Amino acid sequence: MKAYLMSILLLASCLGCKEDATQPIVTNNPLTSSLDQTVHSAVEKYASASSTGGFVIGIFRNDSTFIYRYGHSNKKAHQLPDENTIHLLWITQK
């Protein structure tokens, strides 16, 4: 399970790996546990890219749910994504 989780997080962190201006990372991640720190380090480069919008990472582990919100769902209002945020997903094929 841990290897699967890390694969997903590493994939997410590489989605924005192009050269881009950076921005401060806005998040609700408290960075207090090792899981918090692992998630943050995996997405740090992607989350700090100025072209990155808001995103949410949900983890289910040992009957517990962990929700990490990054970026803005509305940049003008500076709001973190929440349970009402609609995320647009797409797949690019070559």
Image (cartoon, rainbow, N blue to C red):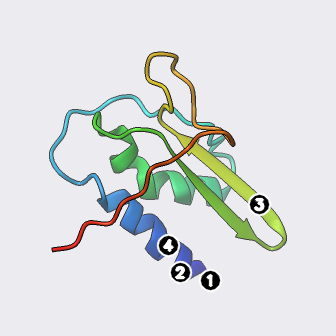
Residue identified by numbered label 4: 6
Split into 4 quadrants, where in the image is the C terminus? Answer: bottom left
Position of 92 with respect to 64 (left or right) is left
Amino acid carrying mark 1 in the image? Met
Amino acid carrying mark 2 in the image? Tyr
Residue identified by numbered label 2: 4
Q: Element under label 4? A: helix
Measure how far apart labels 2 and 3 are at the Cα level. Answer: 16 Å
Amino acid carrying mark 3 in the image? Thr
Measure how far apart labels 1 and 3 are at the Cα level. Answer: 15 Å
Q: Is residue 7 above or below residue 75?
A: below
Q: Are marks 1 and 2 in contact (CB under 8 Å)?
A: yes
- Give the residue drawn at x 66%, y 64%: 59
Q: Quadrant of residue 60?
A: bottom right
Q: Element under label 2? A: helix
Q: Element under label 3? A: strand
- Give the residue drawn at x 51%, y 20%: 78
Q: Nearer the viewer, mark 3 or mark 4?
A: 3
**Residue 77 location (% of width, % of height):** 52, 16
**Residue 3 location (% of width, % of height):** 52, 82
Q: Are marks 2 and 3 in contact (CB under 8 Å)?
A: no
Around disc 4, counting alpha carbons within 10 Å, would you say few (fewer than 14), some (14 to 19), or many (20 or more)? some
Residue identified by numbered label 3: 65
Residue identified by numbered label 1: 1
**Residue 1 location (% of width, % of height):** 62, 83
Q: Are marks 2 and 4 in contact (CB under 8 Å)?
A: yes
Measure how far apart labels 3 and 4 are at the Cα level. Answer: 16 Å
**Residue 45 location (% of width, % of height):** 33, 48
